[in-house]
Amino acid sequence: MAENRKRPNPLRFPNFKVCKRKATEDKITTLPDDILSTILSQLTFKEAVATSILSRRWRYLWTFHPNLPIRCEDVVLKEDRDDISFRRKSKIHGVHKDKFIQTVNQVLRGRKGRELQEFGIHYPLLESSACHIDLCVAFAIAINVSKLGLNFSPYPYLVPTYSNENYSIPLEFFDKAKGMEPYLVQLEHALSIPTSSLNVQNRFKSLRELILKCVDLTDEHFEAILSNCTSLEGLHLHESSRLVNVKHSVPHMKLKCLEIFHCRKLEKVEVFVPNLVSFKYRGSKIHIFVKDAKQLFNLCMCSYTGELEYPRDNSLGLPYIQSRDFIFGQFAAHLSRLEYLMMDVGSFEGKQQFNKHPLFSNLKHLSLTSLNSSHGPCGGMLRCYHTVAFFVEASPFLHRLELHHGIYYCVIILDINTDQILDIHNLFFAVSYSSFQKSKIEKNCDISRRYLKEVLVSGFFGNELAKDIILSIFNFAIELEKIELTTVSLYDLSIRAFRNCGVDIEVVRRCMGQLHQRLPANAQLHFLDDHF
């Protein structure tokens, strides 16, 4: 019966039209490469690579991505990353390494000689992989990359690790007088990248930021980098075990950010950087001289405690720097201009330091770090808040306060007789014992109480001592708007945030409830941990 069914007669139904189905057009795919490249630039590198499965047109478009920070997590599957641990180093430097290097080589072949803004390798490669790393660095130099990052820190370790097998960049890469022809020949033969597409003459002319982690540099390397990378604005050096006497006496006019973390043999830093805005250092107490940095607004100076407080070897014959001189002596000329200061409480020895140096008249953001184990189970935290009392006096326009406690904070006992240590509730009013005139104190305290709006406490585990101190902040900061708490330790900027697995969830929740009940009317309490 269906076979006898007739099609409608167009004459009988004049409004009826027989339409043919047209294939859906993919208008995005028809766009020019430049526009598609702009679209891909808004994605992460991993997301951009994933677009290669859409169609033939998209297969190699990801190679146009302007930023290529190739990371371990982009190459190694999650289940394999979780399997990488201290007991399975063979996998890190075995099958996973080979897969990672293969992926990097494929990326370089795809890029050919196209310009690149950012290029990075983030995988625990050692000196044994130098032949592959050298080609990557040579490629970055030849295409005038703007940001170069080499992060060979062991994954996923959290603490600084020192190895005699760290990779070291060939010095001739930074020396214009020395040729790069052997590396260019290797690029052409091994990776099929034609030399004609590369521009080696400028050599780091476009480099704006250089990040080197677990890359061994010598003093000569440091001098060559600043001498030849004249456009460099940011230099970040982490865990280089060969730096000793870092010096650059010729003014570098472009450098704005200098960061040196965990260089265990370093004894002295002397740089001439007139336009430096940010200086960050973490390590032993060493001699630091930053010449003519009249725009220095951001300072981070965190030293080790205990037996690592000073360099292990003092080959330069320099005297050990005293704690009170580590910051307040070496940066005395810059204190009144600082807007952000991060320091460890071990470098602060009392109110007498403010008698000799200018007040922090521009300080808006103060970040204090402490390791509790250095002064007993709670000594570091108490000293941290004790230091705050004096900074409140000297920083009339302080807007944000951060208190970071080290990972050893997890051993703090939960029940403690605070009366035997310090009267926490009167802690912030200890400024009345300062040698400054009483009228000046009251004026500065009153201003500070009005401007202090935000507080962050990391390494928070909900013990009674921490609760009492936070309650004292509620009483002190009369116009507090926001307080943030987290059990994660943000003690060290150079490592990943540390989440302690031994946190007592019930203790933290109970403390949070008590804080909510005492919270000032206009303030908000935020707990940043996802699992609470």
Image: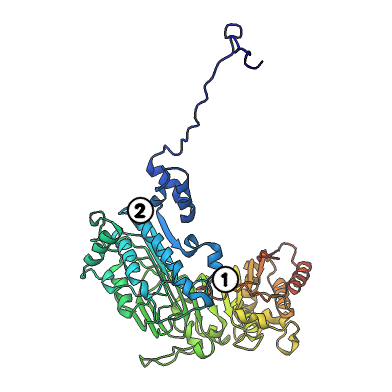
Q: Residue 497: give its label.
A: 1
Residue 231 drawn above or below residue 418: above
Q: Is residue 111 left or right of residue 339?
A: left
User: Who comes first in sequence, dot 1 or dot 2?
Assistant: 2
Task: Look at the image and tell me whether residue 321 can be seen.
Answer: yes
The one of 378 and 167 positioned closer to us in this rendering: 167
Residue 507 appears in which quarter of the rendering?
bottom right
The image shows residue 38 at horizontal and vertical percentages of 42, 47
Residue 436 appears in which quarter of the rendering?
bottom right
Q: Which residue lies at the image location 42% right of the left edge and 75% below the top edge?
A: 214
Q: Dividing the image into 4 quarters, which one contains the C terminus?
A: bottom right
**Between marks 1 and 2 in the image, the one whose residue lies nearer the viewer:** 2
Q: Is residue 421 left or right of residue 338?
A: right
Q: Is residue 348 left or right of residue 93?
A: right
Q: Amino acid at mark 2?
A: Gly
Tell me the element at label 1: loop
Tell me the element at label 2: helix
Q: Is residue 380 left or right of residue 270?
A: right
How far apart marks 1 and 2 lie (CA) works out to 35 Å
Q: Amino acid at mark 1?
A: Ala
Q: Residues within 10 Å of mark 2 (few under 14, many from 20)?
A: some
Q: What colour scheme was applied to this rendering of the protein?
A: rainbow
Q: Which residue lies at the image location 37% right of the left edge and 82% below the top edge?
A: 242
Q: Residue 133: give its label.
A: none
Residue 317 drawn above or below residue 467: below
The image shows residue 457 at horizontal and vertical percentages of 64, 72
Q: Residue 110: give its label.
A: 2
Q: Dividing the image into 4 quarters, which one contains the N terminus?
A: top right
The one of 155 and 489 positioned closer to us in this rendering: 155
